[in-house]
Image (cartoon, rainbow, N blue to C red):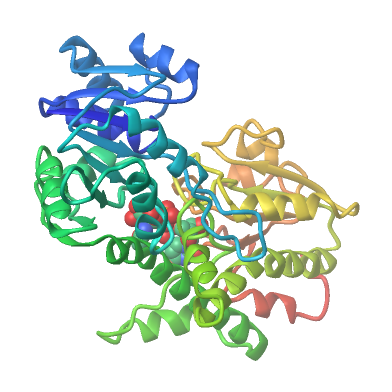
Amino acid sequence: MKVCVIGLGYIGLPTSVMFAKYGAEVVGVDVHPHVVESLNKGEAHLEEPGLQELLNEALENKKFKAQLVPEPADAFIIAVPTPNNLNDNMSCDLTYVLQAVESTIPYIRKGSTIIVESTIAPRSIEDYVQPLLEKNGFTIGEDIYLVHCPERVMPGNIFHELINNMRIIGGITPSCSDAGEKIYRTFVKSKIVKTDAKTAEMSKLMENTFRDVNIALANELTKICNDLHINALDVIEMANMHPRVNIHSPGPGVGGHCLAVDPYFIVAKAPETADLISRSRSINSSMPFYIVEKVKKIMEIVNGRTITIGGLAYKGDIDDIRESPALEILEMLKSEKDYEVRAYDPYVYHADNAQNLKEALRGSDLFLILTDHSHFKTIHDEDINRMANKVIFDTRNIVLNVPVDCEYFNLGSVHEFLNKPVMHV
Ligand code: SAJ
C-alpha cells in the first residue's frame, strides 16, 4: 500500500513513520522546505519519544521520503492545522485543510481514499471537502472514498496511542468507512468504530468539550466557594466520593491546542443553541483574570513587590505553551508597574525564565504556582528560604510538603488568607 501524508507535524509525522513501520510505502508532504530537508537527512524536527528511531528505520528500509508535492497513492491523509478564525465566534479555519485536499487532486486515482485527520467543525467534510472533490469530477463512494478519522493521541505517548486507542472512521458512504478501516488496520490493534463523517467530527469535538465544560463547573464552584468562605477543594473531594460524580480540578485556566480551541468550532456552528458550551469557554477564559485579582490582594496584604511564577506550560511535565493561561497571567502581572515579575519553568524556553527556582525565588514575596509540573511537588528549604515573604499560592494544588514557616494556600483556601485582617508575614 502507498500512503501520502499531507502535513508533517505532531500528528502527520508520527502517522507516516507508523505506516512505514508496518510495511506501507509512505510519501510525506510538507510546505516547509526545511522540514522536508531535515527529515530526508534523518533528523526529526519534533520531540516525541520513539520518533527519531522510527524515522531512522523508515529511511533505512526506504519506506519513507519527504517532499514538497504529493504523488499518486492509495490513501491521502490530511493532517494540517485548523486554527480558530479570528472572528467573533472563533469558527474553524479550514483554509489549510482545503488547500491540502486541493493539492492531492492531480494525484488521486480510481480507488484512492482521502482521509482528513485534522480536527474540524461538524459538517466540514459534507459541506466543503466533498463538494471540492465532486467539482473535480469524482463520485464519492464509487471512484474514490472520503472519510474523517479524527486524531486522538496525546503528545508524549503518541506511538502507544496510535496503536491502542480506538479509532472513529466517519465515511461519506458505508463503502468509504470500509475503505478507511482497511487502511488503519495496518497498525491499529484496538476497536475501529465506523460511522458517518458528521458524527465522527462531532464526537471528536465533544470529547474535548466535555472536559472543558466540566473544568468550567469546577472553576465556577471555586469562585462561589471562595465568596462563601467554603473550601472548594474539600467540597470536590467529598462530592467525588459518590460513585457517579466526577468534578474536575479547578485551576488558573484551560490551555493547550484542544480544549481551548475545539469547543468554539461547535459554538460557531450553533451560536444560538450552544449556550452551556459557550458559557463554559467564558468561565475558563476568565480564570487568569480571577487569579490576577487574587494576587493583587495577596500582594497588598504582604506589602510586597516581587512575584515568582512557577510554570509557564499549559499543563504539567510538558514544554507546550500554546494557549497557556500562565503566559496570560505573566503578561497581566508584568503590565502592573508595581510588581517585579519573574518566572521559572524547567521545561520551557522563555525570555522571562530564570535559570533555576532558587534564583527565581531570591527576595520574592510570592511564589505563584501556575503549572502542575512534578518539579513543584516538593518545596525545598534552600529555595523557599531565599524569599523575602515565604508565601505560596498553589493554583494547581500540587505541593505535597508545606514548610512549617511558610504561608501556603490553594484555590480552596485562598479566601482564608485574604480575610485575615493584617499583614502577617
Ligand atoms: N485542566 C484543568 N482541570 C482539569 C483538567 C485539565 O484545569 O481537571 C486544564 C489543564 O491544566 C490544561 C487544560 O485543562 O491547561 C487541558 O488539559 P487536558 O490534559 O485536559 O487536555 P489536552 O488538551 O492536553 O489533551 C486533550 C485530551 N482530550 C481528552 O482528555 C478528552 C487528549 O486525550 C487529546 O488527545 C487531546 O486533547 C487532543 O488532541 O484532542
Along the viewing direction, whichever of 122 and 351 lies nearer the viewer: 122
Question: x and y percent of residue 311 in the render?
Answer: 58, 47
Question: x and y percent of residue 424 in the render?
Answer: 78, 70
Q: Is residue 254 left or right of residue 87?
A: left
Residue positioned 76% across, 69% down in the render: 293
Q: Is residue 119 above or below residue 350?
A: below
Which of the 4 image quarters holds residue 369? bottom right
Q: Is residue 152 left or right of residue 399?
A: left
Which of the 4 image quarters holds residue 37? top left
Q: Is residue 142 left or right of residue 9?
A: left
Question: x and y percent of residue 161 in the render?
Answer: 23, 46
Q: Is residue 321 left or right of residue 333?
A: left
Looking at the image, in which quadrant does ligand 1 appear? bottom left
Q: Is residue 398 visible in the rendered structure shown here?
A: no
Q: Is residue 368 above or below residue 18?
A: below
Q: Which residue is situated farthest in the right direction here?
A: 337
Along the viewing direction, whichever of 383 and 206 lies nearer the viewer: 206
Residue positioned 39% across, 71% down in the render: 210
Residue positioned 9% across, 46% down in the render: 189
Locate the C terminus and report the quarter of the image it occupies.
bottom right
